[in-house]
Image (cartoon, coloured by chain):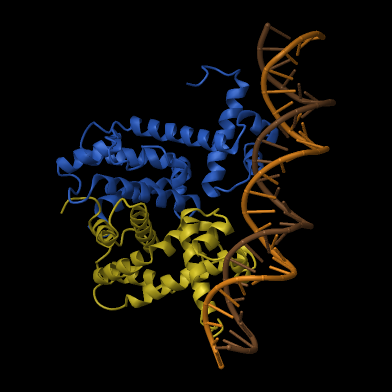
Chain colours: A yellow, B blue, C brown, D orange
Amino acid sequence: MTETSESGARGRTRRAILSAAARVLARDRSATLADIAAAADVGRSTLHRYYADRDVLVQAVVEDSLAVLQEATEGAGLDQGPPADALRRLVAALVDVGDRALFLWGDPRVLEGYPTAGDPDCEPVDDPMIELIERGQAEGAFDPGVSAQWIQHVVWGLIYTGAEDAAYGRIPRHGVAQLVIRTLENGIRPH
Amino acid sequence: MTETSESGARGRTRRAILSAAARVLARDRSATLADIAAAADVGRSTLHRYYADRDVLVQAVVEDSLAVLQEATEGAGLDQGPPADALRRLVAALVDVGDRALFLWGDPRVLEGYPTAGDPDCEPVDDPMIELIERGQAEGAFDPGVSAQWIQHVVWGLIYTGAEDAAYGRIPRHGVAQLVIRTLENGIRPH
DNA sequence: CAATTTTGGGACATCAATGTCTCATTGAGA
DNA sequence: TCTCAATGAGACATTGATGTCCCAAAATTG
């Protein structure tokens, strides 16, 4: 899919652009290409040299972010051990790449056309996260009285909330995962 | 603050513009003024006649939305009865005006400068929602192990998630409040 | 060190959104 | 019915983002 190796320097520049774009666009999806170039510490010409179009750039950031999140998800080994433990690992992994989540989730429109997060009626998605949730519901670890999709959205929503609070410095970054998991497992009830 | 009465027709037009703007901007915060005017079924000239500036319009929508949410909050009588019941009333009331919440929350930047949702360090906010949460924590209804602000953000986040799912037709509108409350109270554990 | 790649900055043309204005039409209220 | 506020459509200048191109400087590579 991608050229196996681009001269080292190009790869570095490309990653810098993608990462900066995700960061900036997460905060302001109408950010200027000049803003993004500046954030990536790159000339605007260079940005255009890598991504001819704004659309092309956004698309690339979407795909890169999806890949990053997918990698994080796969690394969590969701099919192993008790569902509750697996979910804790997943949340911890996703919080670490919160910027990407913030970007993808901040604007539902960038994901139009991707079955991943959507609800295309007849799509038998093999999303590992959904599989985990359904397994947990079957084993009595998660509430079987609501849809797996709702639980998934709740998880994403809490991660989003935590990532945002952290991004604005309202809570320390290292406490986010713990907070999200605690709320996820107990709601807001004391325990 | 507002002129007591504007010729009847003007008031109607103004409300139509504000409502349409909230609806359109909630979905796409970079929507064109022409888009908004069209959604309000009004000429672009008329839009400019009411709100000279884009900034002025957005500002007006923010304030109108804040007023709507505040009204909903006040109507819930948060200082009466058990905290858990009060929270249920609040969630139900806020879900009803989900469009405004979607608009205000979809772009954290529109709220910059408003102490309402923020965390200005030294601001002793008298936000009734925070007061309810703190009361609930003191009375043992809500988890005292996390900050009241975190709980508030979780509540908003879940309402946002529910409103979005409803807006995209993924869940029936009348089930949202119930779903949010259930998740809020129990997390995702079975019970 | 020499050759080649990669880069930054600037000069453009282009395009879409914005804001201002005018004028003819509409419609509500006296 | 008459009057005047309110509106819609359009013309227009302005602005800012965008995309393209070129060239000299810098960095990477051999």
Q: Nearer the viewer, residue A44 or B100?
A: A44
The image position of residue A65, as x and y in percent, is 47, 68
> Would you say A27 lies left or right of B39 here?
left
Image quarter where the N terminus of chain A lies is bottom right
| Looking at the image, residue A20 lies above or below residue A131 | above
Q: Nearer the viewer, residue A149 or A67?
A: A67
The image position of residue D27, as x and y in percent, is 52, 77
| Looking at the image, residue B15 lies above or below residue B88 | above
Exactly how many numbered labels are in the figure? 0
Q: Nearer the viewer, residue B64 or A141?
A: B64
Determine which quarter of the picture holds residue A7: bottom right
The image position of residue A46, as x and y in percent, is 60, 69
Q: Nearer the viewer, residue A191 or A40?
A: A40
Q: Residue at horizontal 55%, vertical 62%?
A: A37
Q: Residue at horizontal 43%, vertical 41%?
A: B111
> Would you say C9 lies left or right of B138 here?
right
Q: Is residue A102 visible?
A: yes
Q: Is residue A119 visible?
A: no
Q: Residue at horizontal 37%, vertical 37%?
A: B93
The image position of residue D25, as x and y in percent, is 60, 71
| Looking at the image, residue B174 lies above or below residue A37 | above
> Would you say A4 lies left or right of B120 here?
right
Q: Residue at horizontal 54%, vertical 57%?
A: A35
Image quarter where the C terminus of chain A lies is bottom left
